[in-house]
Amino acid sequence: MSWALVTGASSGIGLRYATALARDYKYNVLLVSNQQKELRTAAADIAAQFGVQTQSLCINLAEHDAAEQVYDFCQNNSLDIEVLVNNAGMLIFDAFRNTDPRKIETLLMLHVVTMTKLCRLFAEDMINRKSLNRKSQNGYILNMASMSAWMAMPSITCYNASKSYVLNFTKALWYEMRRHNVRVLAVTPGSTDTGLLPFGDKFGKLLRFFGITMSPETLVNRALKVLFRRRKKTCMPGAWNYIIVPIINHLPDRLVLTAMKRIPLNW
């Protein structure tokens, strides 16, 4: 049985990816995160519930050699990674001028450097995996971008710029890997109900009913179906997002500047 590797897998969307890959696709799962206690608990629970093998690796993915450490761990433990899910990330919500440069570096390491290096290291192994059936896939790479990658959004400047990198890098990688039977997908979700949204229960249910926000489970299920069953470069779950993105992209600058005044930040 092959292995799936999920970063940021100790909680939230990453945990849902790890769970779905074990439950619905019967992969062994390597869970990677910097939260040791939660990571071990999640790995043990998944193994017990779904009868697969799991391993956990506690590591700070913002370190400069984090990708190499993850890859070496897989090599040393003979883990044949067939599915790579780059989910780990962070959000900085503040005016750029107020943002701690160390936080910027951490964000860029997570979203750009480590993600790119993990793709590079594991993609080569996927290419070298000679499938007996030419129609079967040699590997799968899923990179979590964001709906914000399609637009410029003040107050999350570094986040949405880095997610734009994830989106365009993944789309370009899709072309290169297609001939090697490796599927590559960028997921660009909009609002996801992870329990952190500032809405009451009733309003939150209303947003979910109309598809404006979705549960992590729905997001993950849709993303994995596209990854395994289709050959698309991108997946933006939620019909509303296809309406919202062009509207925001065509807002007049004057309206954006007016909206910024209502955000309680020191611009």
Image (cartoon, rainbow, N blue to C red):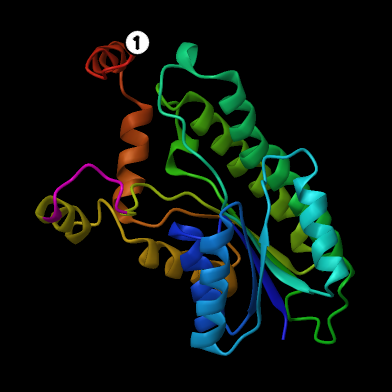
Which corner quadrant of the image does residue 252 belong to?
A: top left
6, 186: nearer the viewer: 6
For the stretch drawn in magenta, what is the main secondary structure? Answer: loop
| Residue shown at 57% from the left, 50% from the top | 88
Q: Quadrant of the C terminus?
A: top left
| Residue shown at 73% from the left, 72% from the top | 82
The residue stretch that appears in magenta:
195-201
| Residue shown at 55% from the left, 44% from the top | 89
Q: For the image shown, how many numbered marks are present on the structure?
A: 1
Q: Secondary structure at mark 1?
A: loop
Q: How far across and how far down the image is residue 185, in percent?
A: 60, 57
Q: Amino acid at mark 1?
A: Asn
In the rendered view, tell whether residue 251 sits above or below residue 258: below
Which corner quadrant of the image does residue 147 belong to?
A: top left
Q: Residues within 10 Å of mark 1 (few under 14, many from 20)?
A: few
Q: How far across and how far down the image is residue 239, in percent?
A: 31, 55
Q: Is residue 62 on the magenta stretch?
A: no
Q: Give the residue number, with chain letter if any, for mark 1.
A: 266
Q: How far across and how far down the image is residue 184, in percent?
A: 66, 59
Task: Using the rendered image of the protein, determine whether residue 230 is visible from the camera's viewpoint.
Answer: no
| Residue shown at 54% from the left, 19% from the top | 100
